[in-house]
Image (cartoon, rainbow, N blue to C red):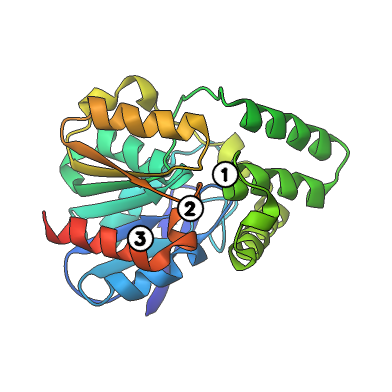
Amino acid sequence: MTSGRVQVENGELAYEIRGEGDPVILLHGGILDSRMWDAEMKALGRHHTAIRYDARGHGESSTPTERFRHYDDLRELMAALGLPRASLVGLSGGGRIAVDFALTYPDQVENLVLVATGLSAMVTKDPFVLEQNKKLEEAGARGDLPAAIECILRMWVDGPRRTPADVDQRVRRLCQEMYTQTVVRHGLSGFTLMDELQAVERVGELTPRTLTLVGDLDSSDIVAISCQIESEARDARKLVVPGVAHMINLEKPAEFSRILLDFLASS
């Protein structure tokens, strides 16, 4: 594993690279960091050049001070690493970045793997997520960080159909640690200062070969997005993973790596 930092406009990104072969870039979920891809770095590194990085406002990358675009940061990273083209694997907010990038720079995307993805400009409708978001705002207003983090865990680790006790506690603790460290170090600047596209209205413009994965226990909004991508993107198929919610790769790392490698090998 090699690591480094890339300068981007008004900031820098921390990254790691492992292996040799066709490049695959891993984009972590929002408020998380690139540690969520530990298993995939090992699995991909046997056959590919696996690259993971912390998005601006997350992990070891810089805290935003001015408005920026995550998808332009990704373009700067690829340019600095000498990658004219790569496959992108994004979970949740990382999938939003990957889709915005694919719409803006389609010639630079080999394959898209969108895991429990959102889309820029999507509207939240799931009652459970709306309820937890309200509790999150209330916790933030009174400065109760542990309660705020618990709301995020309930939405994006447990999901609407499980209790915290139903979830692998190692996964929950890892996500809790990443969420807490991101908020303490960066606040929510990675969201409040970012500019996005209106990708939810432009899914039909996606041209890369695409696989979208969704857990059957995830929120109805995320399930709906996966169905939209499958039906509207030019070359997309959907795979439902049973028994998991949002953190598919963390809950089922072996199965996820197999699915990912099989998809990449079939291109």
Q: Nearer the viewer, residue 247 or 7?
A: 247
Marker disc for residue 256? 3
Between discs 1 and 3, the one toward the N terminus: 1
Between discs 3 and 2, the one toward the N terminus: 2
Badge nearest the viewer, 3 or 2: 3
Q: Position of residue 226 (x, y in %)?
A: 36, 34
Q: Residue at x 66, y 45 (%)?
A: 154
Marker disc for residue 124? none
Proximity of marks 2 and 1: CB atoms separated by less than 8 Å: yes
Q: Amino acid at mark 2?
A: Ala
Q: Residue at x 27, y 59 (%)?
A: 260
Q: Is residue 191 left or right of residue 263?
A: right
Q: Secondary structure at mark 2?
A: loop
- How many angstroms separate mark 3 from mark 2 (CA)? 22 Å
Q: Residue furthest bottom?
A: 1
Badge nearest the viewer, 1 or 3: 3
Residue marked by disc 2: 55
